[in-house]
Structure formats: structure tokens, C-alpha cells
Amino acid sequence: MKIVFIGLGNMARAVIGGMLRKDIVKPEDIIGTAKTCETREKTAAEFGILTMEKNADAAAQADVLVLAVKPQFLEEVIREIKDVTKPDTLVISVAAGKSLAWLEEAFGRKMKLVRCMPNTPALVGAGCTGVCAGEAVSEEEKNYSLRLMESFGKADLMPERLIDAAGAVSGSSPAYVFMFIEAMADAGVAAGMPRAQAYEFAAQAVYGSAKLVLESGKHPGELKDMVCSPGGTTIQGVRVLEERGMRGAVMAALAACVEKTKSL
């Protein structure tokens, strides 16, 4: 089985790395394409896969075709490959905002289509990916798609109507979490901590808090209350965050993300 990646950016490299670590596929069965010679050579050296310059040459060999390019380039890429892509090829798109109906229209025929929304923590094997599949995709192919996405973290099947929301909650949110870590570290530096130590403490606090949510089964509000002693220091910080509208800002940011995704 040949798996072809059109585009070799961060998401493609995360998927390739995960598949190889989990021994889902061998390096010799993976082909990747990229515009620049530098990217092709770097990826080939890193993973031991075959790389090509021409998208159509690679797509013609695909049993599984992963479209890992930015949404604004997807239409052009599909024009290049649609006539050489085999009818029974499983096509997996990781492009935000491009629906299954849009993909089918771009190919101009019925295809086996899957949409996935990974996130950048996939690069360290801690991704979270929403997956939805078209009508032509078999249960076996759905499960295979899930296996690919689970090779670098958590993945869940969901109806397509939820995929944009999942993209906002897990796909875009790492940027907001990084901003939160940066702000906490800046506060630590202002209070006298060395910057490297402040980043480490802030990042570890976020990591541990997320792990506690996932493993304890407790509501985040309950866990927050556990930290807030009556008359203590933490509740004063919570009070300031509420006064400054933290919850509303986060909800508005994710709503803006969903709105933008739907317009792509």
C-alpha cells in the first residue's frame, strides 16, 4: 500500500513520524511532495521516505492520498492530481474549512473522502484530531484513518457539522495556550524568576493541569475550586481574570476562529 503526502509541512511530518513510530507503514511505502528541494531533501533524510517534485506523479501511485497543504492552495493542487488519482484511492484532507462536498466537487466525481483536523501538539505525539468521513468510505477505511491520526495522539470520529468547532477547540487553541504560558512566564520574570525557569514552570503547570482534567474525570470548575482556598491568593487572581473578561475573551476568540473557518 502506497501512502502519498501532498505537502510536507508540520502536519504531514507529524503524521509520517507517528505512522513510522507505530509501525503502521514502512518508509519505502511513503511518498511525499513539496515545492522546494530543501524540504524534500530534509524530509527524505529525516524519515527515509521517497520524495518527488511533481504532485501528479506521486498521486498516481497513491492508495491513500493525504492532502496536507494550506486551504488556499488546495483547489490548485486538486486540479493537478484529479485526473490521475485512482477511483478507489482513500483521500484524507487536513485543510481547514474545505467540506467533503467541496472536495468532491473539486475532484469532479465520487471519491472516498475523509476530513481531519490535527493540531500542532501532534509534533510531540500529543495531538488531538477530529475525523469525519464521506458516504463512500467503508468502516475499515474509517478505522484505518483513525489509526493514522491516533499514531500521534488522540483522534475521534464525529459528524462533519462538528469538525469546524473541533478545529477551533483543539486545532487553533494551542496558539492561545502558548500566549497564556508566555504571559504567565512574563509575570514570573517581573516577580524575579529567570526567564527559562519561568517558561518551564508555566508550561509544566499547564501540562499538569490538562493531565489532571483528563485523568481525574472532575469538572474543570471543581478542579479550579480545589486550588482556591478561602481568603487565599489564588482566588484573588481568579477575581482579576473574571473582572478582565477572560472567559468571554476565550469564547469570542474560538467563535471568531469557527466563523473564519466556515468562510474559507
Image (tube, rainbow, N blue to C red):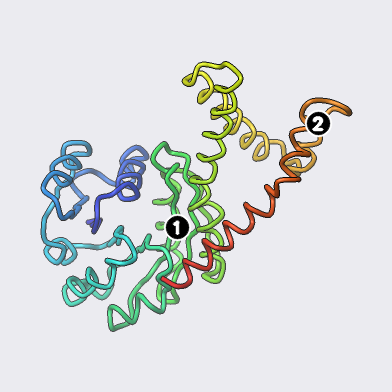
Residue shown at 16% from the left, 37% from the top:
45
Q: Which mark is residue 37?
A: none
Q: Residues within 10 Å of mark 2 (few under 14, many from 20)?
A: some
x 22%, y 72%: residue: 86
Q: From the image, tell me which residue sits under label 2.
A: 228
Depth order, front residue of 135/263: 263
Q: Are marks 2 and 1 in contact (CB under 8 Å)?
A: no
- x and y percentages locating residue 160 in the rendered image: 51, 70
The x and y percentages for residue 140 are: 42, 62
Can you tell which quarter of the image residue 198 is in? top right
In the picture shown, does residue 149 fall above or below 208?
A: below
Q: Amino acid at mark 1?
A: Met
* Quarter the N terminus occupies: bottom left
Q: Furthest-front residue in view?
A: 190
At label 2, the amino acid type is Cys
In primary-sequence order, the first of circles 2 and 1 is 1
178 left or right of 234 in image: left
Q: Does residue 224 appear left or right of residue 231 in this picture? A: left
Residue 116, above or below 155: below
> 154 and 123: which one is in front?
123
> Residue 212's image quarter?
top right
Q: Which mark is residue 117?
A: 1
Q: Secondary structure at mark 1?
A: strand
Q: Is residue 164 above or below residue 233?
A: below
Question: Few, some or many C-alpha atoms within 10 Å of disc 1 (few <14, some 14-19, many ≥20)?
Answer: many
Q: Secondary structure at mark 2?
A: loop
